[in-house]
Amino acid sequence: MQPNARNVFAMFDISGNIKRIDRMKSGIINDSYHVMVECNGKLKEYTLQRINGNVFRHPEQIIDNIERITLHIKKKLEQRGEDTENRLLIPIHLKTGENFYRDDIGSFWRLYPYIDHSISYNTVETPEIMKMIGKAFGEFQSQLADFPAETLYTTIPDFHNTKKRFYMLYDAWRENSAGRANAETGALLGSLKEKEKIAFKIQNLVEKGEMPIRVTHNDTKSNNVLLHELTNEPVSVIDLDTVMPGLSVHDFGDAVRYGANTGAEDEVNLSKVSLDLKMYEAFAAGFIPEIAEGLTDIELEYMSLGAITMTLELSARFLTDYLNGDIYFKTKYPNHNLVRAKSQLTLAEDMLEKYEQMKEIINKYR
Ligand code: GN1
Ligand code: MG
């Protein structure tokens, strides 16, 4: 049986009495709880999380990565005389000293301070907000520019290896374990396969050693940034589970894929899905100047292709999971992953039509 969040919380080195614990609506991988504690008449808040062990094979390595990354950022903020209170997800330790709790059924739990007075956006409404999200991810990357990437654990190997993602799709199709290989999924797969050449371009450059490897976030959805509730200035970048050596063009691309879509990631009505170039430009305007100093020409050249690549990759990942019987992403209804795969493919096709414009926009930042 799943242990109770209240009992798990009690293992951590926190004093005070729990006032309430609420399950939070969260990402599509982990489970999160908001915990409110009263200590000496003051209320304190925390985020308790159970890590999905199916996705992350070594949660203890993730927590280690996160602790080192957040302490590095803390030092950077202090050097610049910036406030570090209420903006860093530094893992809180157990009473026994470890930085995570492992329950009897093998689940891993971690505890963070809860960052208040901030908002995260599931859908980005305005270019102004999109620009701030870009700025947040850009700052994050620049704060970690001098972090030794090779000392981080690779929490999910080949996470953004687009070629492997496509090959996993082809395997899932052949294995057909959920009996979902049919004309509809076949057409979708065919459409992705047709775009292999463009989808594999960046990975081919990685293999030739032509793309700089940096410490990147790798899951740059808009809801992984906290902005100040009043000023919309970046407060913190969250969901650091996939922070590992990666590519700046992937961080750019994933953020655009998610936040610059005129429809939802899982939009059923495909006529609503397209790339909003204003949002795309706004993200670039926030992101690129923050990291511009360190960017190479090749990264600038492939920035827009990063968006197309990530969108095709996600379409392939969602379709793979659908063919495998929905074992990776949480789903809300039976063909949710299929809907996601179609919607992402539609977005990628629109991006391909707008590719020249996307490149021109990036050229403004050269
Ligand atoms: C997952 O859990 P969440 O929502 O932050 C996934 C991302 C996908 C995203 C698609 C570890 O992110 O790679 O882009 O869903 N995270 C992992 O919505 O696989
Ligand atoms: Mg998330």
Image (cartoon, rainbow, N blue to C red):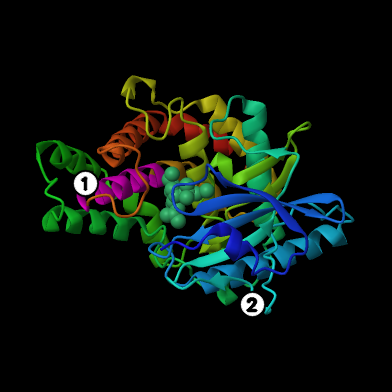
Q: Mark 2 belongs to which amino acid? A: Glu
Instruction: Please name the predominant secondary structure of the magenta segment in the image.
Output: helix
Residue 14 horizontal/vertical position (percent): 74, 65
Is 202 in the magenta?
no
Is 319 in the magenta?
yes
Residue 203 located left or right of residue 218: left
User: Which is nearer the eye, 300 or 239?
Assistant: 239
Counting labels gives: 2
* Range shown magenta: 309-324
Above or below, 93 relative to 237: below
Above or below, 259 relative to 171: above
> What's the residue at 87%, 51% (across, down)?
41
Ligand 1 within 8 A of label 1's CB? no
Residue 144 horizontal/vertical position (percent): 67, 62
Q: Secondary structure at mark 1?
A: helix
Residue 289 horizontal/vertical position (percent): 69, 44
User: Which is nearer the eye, 119 or 160?
Assistant: 119
Q: Which residue is mark 2?
A: 98
Above or below, 28 relative to 241: above
Q: Which residue is mark 1?
A: 193
Image quarter where the N terminus lies is bottom left
Q: Nearer the viewer, mark 1 or mark 2?
A: 2
Q: Mark 1 belongs to which amino acid? A: Lys
> What's the residue at 67%, 62% (across, down)?
145
User: Which is nearer the eye, 225 or 351?
Assistant: 225
